Amino acid sequence: MSDIAHLRKSYEKAELDESASLADPMEQFGLWFQQALDGQLPEPNAMTLATVGADGRPSTRVVLIKGYDARGIVWYTNYESRKGRELAANPQAALQFHWVELERVVRIEGRVEKVSAAESDEYFKTRPLDSRIGAWASPQSQVIPSRTLLVTNAAKYGAQFLTTLVSGGPPRPPHWGGYRLVPDSWEFWQGRKSRLHDRLRYRLEEGKWVRERLAP
């Protein structure tokens, strides 16, 4: 059995200095995200989403970023899932990207809002047909007796929406759509040698971004 306490890695691929970072954190994120895409990393769009329920208990899961702009970071999901219920009770969340191959982490915090119905409709139409049917078939986060229920539901909704294929396919379920995290705090972490990592935080203060270095 491996001794996990002695697993070590020296981070030496890059550095992150204030003078070389961008003043706008969304632009800095866009730069790093594009580099992750250009590097053909496995699932560079995967991010961990952390929420907190009404009982104060935190939970995390991996979701996929589906868009970003000056307004924030967007993903899509079932509004009736655990994360949906927790965001309804407490519309604050944190996101984290971990690009292992680049020795980089991005952490983002802020309030969460639903995207417009029009935005959700537009994105839903771009999803593969089986994914659109799956959004109807899966009662996400609910206890189910077996996988048979999912397969049966998928067959049922597939047959139900068969006639809609000529007009664009299944409509978006009312319980499914997008969220946008509106950032008020960012942290960009670049691994460095001897655990003296670079950490730059951007925090929103009176409508302006303040950039500061944190000790690793």
Image: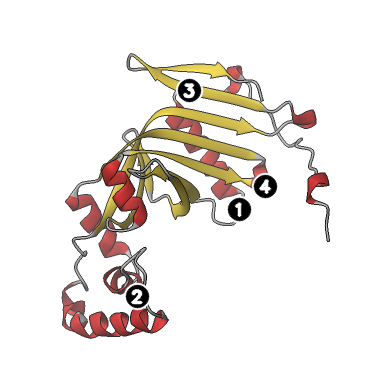
Query: What residue appears at the point 18 percent right and 52 percent down from the top-left corner?
Result: 118
Measured from the top left, where is residue 73 in percent x and y?
Answer: 38, 41
Q: Amino acid at mark 4?
A: Glu
Q: From this viewpoint, is residue 45 visible?
A: yes
Q: Height in image: 181 above or below 159?
A: above
> Which residue bears the numbered disc 2?
130
How crowded pointer 4 is (Cα within 10 Å; few <14, some 14-19, many 20+) is rated as few
Q: Are marks 3 and 2 in contact (CB under 8 Å)?
A: no
Q: Secondary structure at mark 3?
A: strand
Three-letter amino acid code at disc 2? Asp
Query: In terms of sequence position, does the residue under pointer 3 or pointer 2 come before the other?
Result: 2
Q: Amino acid at mark 1?
A: Leu
Number of other residues with Cα within 10 Å of mark 3, as a class: few under 14, some 14 to 19, many 20 or more: many
Can you tell which of label 3 and label 1 is closer to the viewer?
Answer: 3
Residue 1 image-quadrant placement: bottom right
Question: Residue 41, labelled with which disc?
Answer: 1
Q: Residue furthest front?
A: 55
Q: Earlier in the sequence, mark 3 or mark 1?
A: 1
Q: Residue at x 28, y 57 (%)?
A: 123
- The residue at which mark 4 appears reads as 101
Q: CA distance from mark 3 to mark 2?
A: 40 Å
